[in-house]
Image (cartoon, grey):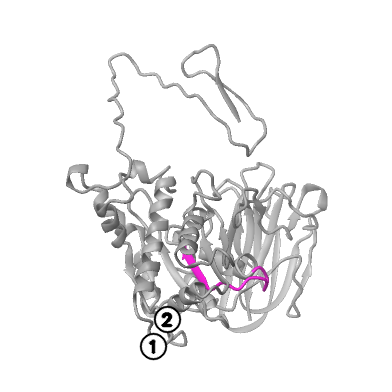
Amino acid sequence: YKFSPEDDVPGKYAFEFDKAGEVAEATIRFYLNDGFKVKEASVEKPVIFDSDEYKQIISKSLLSKGNNYRLKRAIERAKRGEDVTIAYMGGSITQGASAKPINTECYAYKSYKIFKSMFGNDKNNNIHFVKAGVGGTPSQLGMIRYERDILRDGNKTPDIVVVEFAVNDDGDETKGISYESLCLKILAAENKPALILLFSVFVDDWNLQDRLAPVGDHYCLPMVSIKDALVDQFKLPKSAGNIITKRQFFYDIYHPTNDGHTIMADSLAHLFRVTDDSDMEVSDIDINKKPVIGNDFKGIRLLDRKTKIDTAMIEEGSFTETDTDLQKVEMDINVVGTPQFPFNWMHSPASGDRSFKLTISSKSLLLIYKDSGDSEFGRADILVDGLHIKTEDPHINNWTHCNTVLLYNEPEQKQHNVEIKMALGDENKRFTILGFGYTL
């Protein structure tokens, strides 16, 4: 939007909405009542990225170097000039939020470039990059979209996967089962990729490291903690060891600045160096052990309008339209957003009032639907085997993105009948079913 003051009158503004989604500049004037003064903002000294003190805080990010068998093997393959793909799965920080430009200043691309410069062969161009961060989404969705967004339905085979959900998983209904299931799905691949757990942090020093790090400990995975690197030094003045302030690291209360993304990339690079300098472990990790939280969803797959599976039958009812106003994310090195879940089912006022019905034989089922700030969208009732279990409101978060909810999770596979219909009073509104996640 464009923002301009009317006649320079304090508090009186006009808004003109135009070309939504484009980058714009705004001039904002603040006025104080008589008698109030504002302390002059001090200019902070730039972060000295090549200093010994900086290197010391980066070294604190290494929560665990883990069993290096897989990561060391990938590094050695890269040195020999073989093709190596490094992939990144996470939320908005992995998407590159607040990095400017988002495609080249994000931590994912920066750490890929460092890995490439350390171990790659410029002549062969043998190091490849895959980025699949989706803002506002937890591992509960990440585990469903892994084949599509990282493996690209079998067209990509990552050798190293960085997973970053430490500040997104607060809304995970499974309390860590989704996260461990995603980790096991990655680790169980035939080519045995290395998995790195990355723990980002919010401005209030919060993340879910205490919940998620035990998964890394259990499977001896390398782990990098931005919280461990920065939080203690945030509390210090410059004279006592502060290297970067919160104002320098955070663009807002959630996302890093360009300097912040650099620190995240350098923290991953520190793990690369430590691994390269270490002897390779004599044996691989053991993933066939009892899970520390749970592995219920390690075999989860995506079901959408494009997918055909033998164990499911769908009656679209009045959910016959396709929603094209979707959350878009910058994949890989792209600056143009890719629509998420384009093969969807949307109910509209013109399509009638019949229920969407899914008959499926599965152990578990998760629904993915669209959140929206548009008043044309309304609530939908979810019934399983005739029993009402949820009413989903797309305005809880009130912005266009993907939301995932668990419908059932059972020890044995059996047939269920799922019905989705517009809630009472919202029959003449829209609701978009983006897809489902299911396990057999």
Task: Give the crowd class for mark 2: few <14, some 14-19, many >=20 residues within 10 Å.
Answer: some
Q: Is residue 186 left or right of residue 264?
A: right
In the image, residue 145 lies at what x, y percent?
Answer: 61, 66
Say if the magenta span includes residue 154.
yes
Residue lying furthest top: 7
Magenta highlight range: 152-164
Q: Is residue 386 magenta?
A: no
Q: In the image, is residue 110 above or below residue 439?
A: above
- Dominant SS type (magenta): loop
The amino acid beneath tag 1 is: Val
Please, what secondary structure does the residue beneath circle 2 have?
helix
Q: Quadrant of the N terminus?
A: top right
Mark 1–mark 2 distance (CA, rounded to whole Å)? 7 Å
Q: Is residue 200 or residue 262 the one in the foreground? A: 262
Nearest the viewer among 347 and 226 is 226
Picture layout, residue 308 above or below residue 25: below
> Dividing the image into 4 quarters, which one contains the C terminus?
bottom right
* Residue position marked by numbered label 2 in the rendering: 69
Percent position (x, y) of residue 220? 38, 79
Q: Which residue is mark 1?
A: 282
Q: Nearer the viewer, residue 113 or 153?
A: 113
Say which amino acid is labelled 2.
Tyr
- Looking at the image, do the residues carrying marks 1 and 2 touch, with CB atoms under 8 Å apart? yes
User: Sequence order check: which comes first, mark 1 or mark 2?
Assistant: 2
Crowd rating for badge 1 (residues with CA inside 10 Å; few <14, some 14–19, many 20+): few
